[in-house]
Image (cartoon, rainbow, N blue to C red):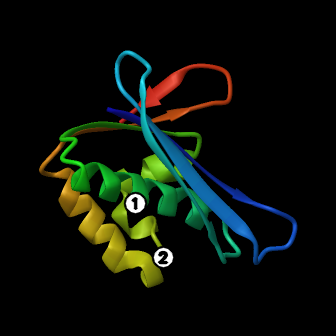
Amino acid sequence: MKVNTDGALIKNPHMAAYGGIFRDCNNFCHGWFAENITTYSPFIGEITASMKAIKIAAEMNWNNLWLETDSQLVLFAFKFHNMVPWYIGNRWINCLHTVTSMNFLVSHIYREGPVHML
């Protein structure tokens, strides 16, 4: 299962949203999610989208998950765990624990261009 996630922040720093879409190897859509949040940081929207995607995949018993994001910071957060702010630290640690029981891959993709994998 592949999930593409994204977060967005508009000019008013209190308004943000994130979302994602799940697709299989045949490009069939298995579901999606979107949610509004309050944050000052685009990174929080991006990382929250990733955590939500992993939570949904675990609940659906999708043990093979490829998370694709357009945020290099999210990619780096999987490698350098201390990048995630303390106030979502527990959720992040739980997320990292969840992916240890999966065949998990995270990659960064530019809007158009090459894919960088971790």
Q: Is residue 80 left or right of residue 69?
A: left
Residue 18: mark in rendering: none
At label 1, the amino acid type is Met
Label 2 SS:
loop
x, y (%) of residue 47? 49, 60
**What is the residue that sits farthest to the top in this orientation?**
26
Q: Residue at image x 17%, y 44%?
A: 102
Please state the horizontal and vertical placement of residue 106, each as a whole percent of the image.
37, 39
Please report the residue visible at 67 percent of the width from the left and 69 percent of the height from the top. 41
Q: Quadrant of the C terminus?
A: top left
Indicate the position of residue 28 as horizontal and vertical percent values: 42, 23
Determine the image quadrant of residue 36.
bottom right
Q: Secondary structure at mark 1?
A: helix
Which is more N-terminal, label 1 or label 2?
1
The residue most toward the bottom is 87
| 108 vs 50: above or below | above
- Which quadrant of the figure contains the N terminus? top left
State the residue position of label 2. Answer: 85
Residue at image point 63% right, 19% down: 113
Residue at the image position 79 percent from the left and 74 percent from the top: 13
From the image, tell me which residue sits under label 1: 51
Relative image position of residue 93 (x, y in whole percent):
28, 70
Number of marks drawn: 2
Specify the farthest residue to the left: 101
The correct choice, above or below, for 118 with respect to 35 in the image is above
In depth, the one of 30 and 54 nearer the eye is: 30
